[in-house]
Image: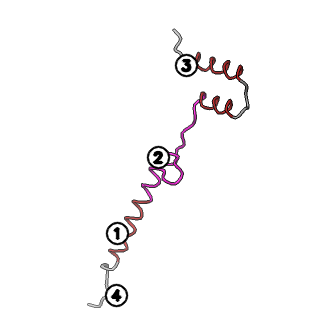
Amino acid sequence: MMHWGYGFWPMIPVFWIGFVALICWGASRMFGWRNRRGPFGMGTEPDAMEILRRRYAGGEIDGPTFDQMRERLEGSARPRF
């Protein structure tokens, strides 16, 4: 029986290298090591209060406007009976 090359055995190290590379790629996507966006690239959206604080810190809104909007946000978060 004639065999061409060495058969399947030389492919085993290539398989394991590919398998380990696939595991590393999957872990980096799952844990977001590159961009820290969260699992599977899902970003976390800032809540309304955080956006309001950022706008106030950036000077887009003044103090009274910030207080008024904060009170509205806190009032809408309370359950109404």
Identify which residue, 43 or 49, lies in the foreground: 49
Q: Amino acid at mark 1?
A: Trp
Q: Is residue 76 magenta?
A: no
Give the residue at mark 4.
5
Look at discs 1 and 3 and give the one toward the viewer: 3
Mark-to-mark CA distance, 3 and 2: 28 Å
| CA neighbours of label 3 inside 10 A, class few (<14), some (14 to 19), many (20+) | few
| CA neighbours of label 2 inside 10 A, class few (<14), some (14 to 19), many (20+) | some
Q: Position of residue 57 (x, y in %)?
A: 67, 32
The residue segment tinted magenta is 25-48
Q: Amino acid at mark 4?
A: Gly
Give the residue at mark 3.
77
Q: Amino acid at mark 3?
A: Ala
Mark-to-mark CA distance, 4 and 2: 44 Å
Give the residue at mark 2.
39
Instruction: Pick out the residue farthest to the top.
Output: 81
Q: Is residue 36 magenta?
A: yes
Q: What label does residue 16 carry, if any?
A: 1
Disc 4, SS: loop
Mark-to-mark CA distance, 1 and 3: 53 Å
Disc 3, SS: helix
Q: Earlier in the sequence, mark 4 or mark 2?
A: 4
* 30 over 70 or under it: above or below: below
On the image, which quarter does residue 8 sit in? bottom left
Mark-to-mark CA distance, 3 and 4: 71 Å
* 48 over 17 or under it: above or below: above
Identify which residue, 70 or 64, lies in the foreground: 64
The answer to whether the residues at label 1 and label 2 have Cβ atoms under 8 Å apart is no
Q: Amino acid at mark 2?
A: Pro
